[in-house]
Amino acid sequence: MTSSKKLTRSLGALLPIFLLACTSDDTSKDSDPVGVDTGGTTGSNGGLTGAASGVSTGSTGSSTSGTTGAATTGGTANGSSSGATSAGTSTGSTGTSGTSGGTSGATGSSTGSTGSTGTTGTNSSGGEPDAGMQERFSFFVTSLEALRKLSKSQEGFGGDLRYGETGANAGLRGADKICTEIAESSMPGSGAKQWRAFLSATDDGTGKPVHAIERIGQGPWYDRLGRLVAMNLTDLNNDRPKGADPAIINDFPNETGTPNHDPDGTGQVDNHDMLTGSTNKGMLYGDAKATCKDWTSAVGADGKPRVGHSWPRQGSGVNWMSCLNEAGCAPGVSLIEMGPPDPSMPTVGSGGGYGGFYCFALSP
């Protein structure tokens, strides 16, 4: 037999086997089109889950699951199982590959959950006052806005600061209560401190005078933003507090920490007069006329209360405790420069103010 005939017979014998193998491969693909599309898609979804969470492992899972898990329905089931180890109908290595795709997707999803936890942590970081700042907050000037709110009058309290208190020393106790409520409104929790109004009086209830400098503690004192006002009474008892923060030494801040000369950011106003009834050393100034009958009267003719300057005013004084006498004890607000107190307008604000006063906490 020639070589060409032998080759022809060999090829003839192999042809049926080759055709059978090709037919079997085509039949497998045609009989399970769902396995092709669904397995690939589901594997991709597993990868997308990881990709959405920002993890490259998920993309790797997509490639493995989409390519290998396509062959059977078993691969499809595993591709969508988010990390399941088996799915009843999966077979052979294809099912295992599908599982790998699902596992990759699950890993991506897990990493994404970690990211969500981080976001929650960020949201929980705000809202509460800083503990250190709250601990230090121990001084402010009562703002016009706060006094209007508590007095329920656009003119403020005038010289009557009892604020619902009765009996001996009611004016001082009422003023202390005003300080406490304003402090609490500014920084919740601060009202728990013992707040004292910087006011002198002729009678403490036993016939003895009350000196403002002696009722506010020993210091140190800080404003609402934690800036130093004075370390002790010696430093405080000067025309302007020694060692005070430069930002506030010549413009005392109100309960929000805003320097009070320009309390709302619209421009400076003439509001420097602050009730004290005190000398430039914080002691009682004169008689009951300097304290509006110990802070129980809002009648204009009942006195000419002594005031200090929350910001220095050249010509009328720089001392924060004692500079001049107002024209009267009636409620009133004057924020426009009009010169010295006007006797025809006998209010606590006639010289440039609104009947504000200083508040100190006994301890920071």
Image (cartoon, rainbow, N blue to C red):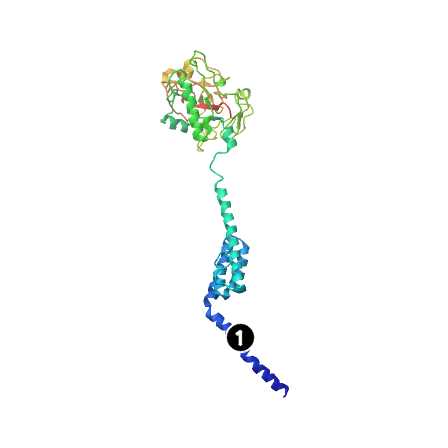
Crowding at dot 1, Cα within 10 Å, few <14 / some 14-19 / many 20+, comes out as few
Quadrant position of the N terminus in the picture: bottom right
Which residue corresponds to the image point at 52% horizontal and 59% vertical from the top-left? 99
Q: x, y percentage for residue 231?
A: 55, 24
State the residue at coordinates (36%, 16%): 301
Task: Decide: is 14 above or below 288.
Answer: below
For badge 1, the amino acid type reads Ala
Judged from this view, the residue extending furthest toward the top is: 207
In this rendered view, identify the residue nearer to me: 326 or 205.
Answer: 205
Residue 357 appears in the rendering = yes
Where in the figure is residue 343, as x and y percent of width and height? Answer: 38, 18
Task: Give me the residue at 41% from left, 14% from top.
Answer: 289
Q: Residue 295 appears in which quarter of the rendering?
A: top left
In percent of the image, x 51 and y 73: which residue is there?
A: 24
In terms of depth relative to the viewer, which is nearer, 147 or 239? 147
In this rendering, the answer to whether 107 lies above or below 222 is below
Q: Position of residue 188 (x, y in %)?
A: 45, 31
Residue 354 is at least partly visible in this image: no
Q: Secondary structure at mark 1?
A: helix
**Count of marks placed on residues:** 1
Which residue extends farthest bottom?
Answer: 1
Across and down, in percent, residue 63 comes to: 53, 61
Q: Which residue is mark 1?
A: 21
